[in-house]
Amino acid sequence: GAVVSQHPSWVICKSGTSVKIECRSLDFQATTMFWYRQFPKQSLMLMATSNEGSKATYEQGVEKDKFLINHASLTLSTLTVTSAHPEDSSFYICSANDRGDSSYNEQFFGPGTRLTVL
Amino acid sequence: SQQGEEDPQALSIQEGENATMNCSYKTSINNLQWYRQNSGRGLVHLILIRSNEREKHSGRLRVTLDTSKKSSSLLITASRAADTASYFCAPAAGANNLFFGTGTRLTVIP
């Protein structure tokens, strides 16, 4: 149980285009979903936290107009990288909390999406 | 900063040996979690230790927590080549957010 999927697993796009990444909790309802970015050999950096039906909370330094997050249901959150540029190339990972286990904040991670902007 | 800091940054051992990784943090925590990441993949939750616990075991994993020193350690016993990965600690201060350090890159040589 507690499986999180991401789609696509990798994407290559031209500079200036927008890319949407989906994050789904497959067998549980997620109270909260998180979006991270990871550059090669570096740690995961939390970008934003989203709760179903409300606006995402962005970490300092993350442009909310650049990285649009929609959390339309308890099982789906999307991250749209708008007008992508080569410096946005990174590994994007989502995670989710299990709504039924709110006592601890264990997160279940998706497999990640590798974005390459040419 | 809320993030954990792992030490060492890299560790290379022979298969069968034990591997110990340390984590230090600066804030008060509700619990501390350890995750593993294989190259180019998502994270896998390994173990969660609550602030009122001092030691926890899960299979070949042993985690200790010393809240007075704001430190934790992860011991992997009888290591296997498949244990090769990056290991991250994530101190959790009660909110949902986890803040990861740069991790320890473990290489287990067959």
Image (cartoon, coloured by chain):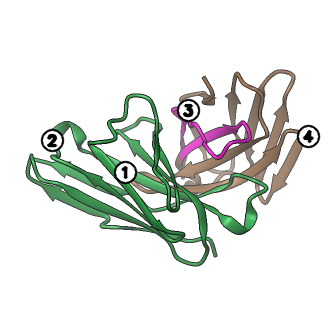
Q: Residue at x 60, y 43 (%)?
A: B97
Left or right: where does residue B107 sit relative to residue A90? right
- Mark 1 secondary-structure assignment: strand
Label 4 sits on residue: B52
Query: Which mark, by number, is residue A52?
Result: none
Label 3 sits on residue: B101
Q: Are marks 3 and 2 on the same chain?
A: no
- Give the alpha-carbon distance from disc 1 to disc 4, as whole Å: 33 Å
Q: Which quadrant of the figure contains the N terminus of chain A?
A: bottom right
- Give the alpha-carbon distance from disc 3 to disc 1, as whole Å: 17 Å
Q: Sequence order check: which comes first, mark 1 or mark 2?
A: 2
When the figure is inspected, residue A10 is found, relative to residue B2, above or below; the finding is below
Label 2 sits on residue: A85
> Residue A15's x, y, as percent?
9, 46
CB under 8 Å between callouts 1 and 4?
no
What hue represents chain B? brown
In the rendered structure, which segment of residues is drawn in magenta? B86-107
Query: Which mark, by number, is residue A92?
Result: 1
Q: Are marks 1 and 4 on the same chain?
A: no
In the image, is residue B103 part of the stretch drawn in magenta?
yes
CB under 8 Å between callouts 2 and 4?
no
- Mark 3 secondary-structure assignment: loop
- Give the alpha-carbon distance from disc 3 to disc 2, as whole Å: 26 Å
> What amino acid is labelled 2 in the image?
His
Q: Sequence order check: which comes first, mark 4 or mark 3?
A: 4
Q: Badge 4, how many Cα within 10 Å: few under 14, some, many 20+?
A: few
- Mark 4 secondary-structure assignment: loop
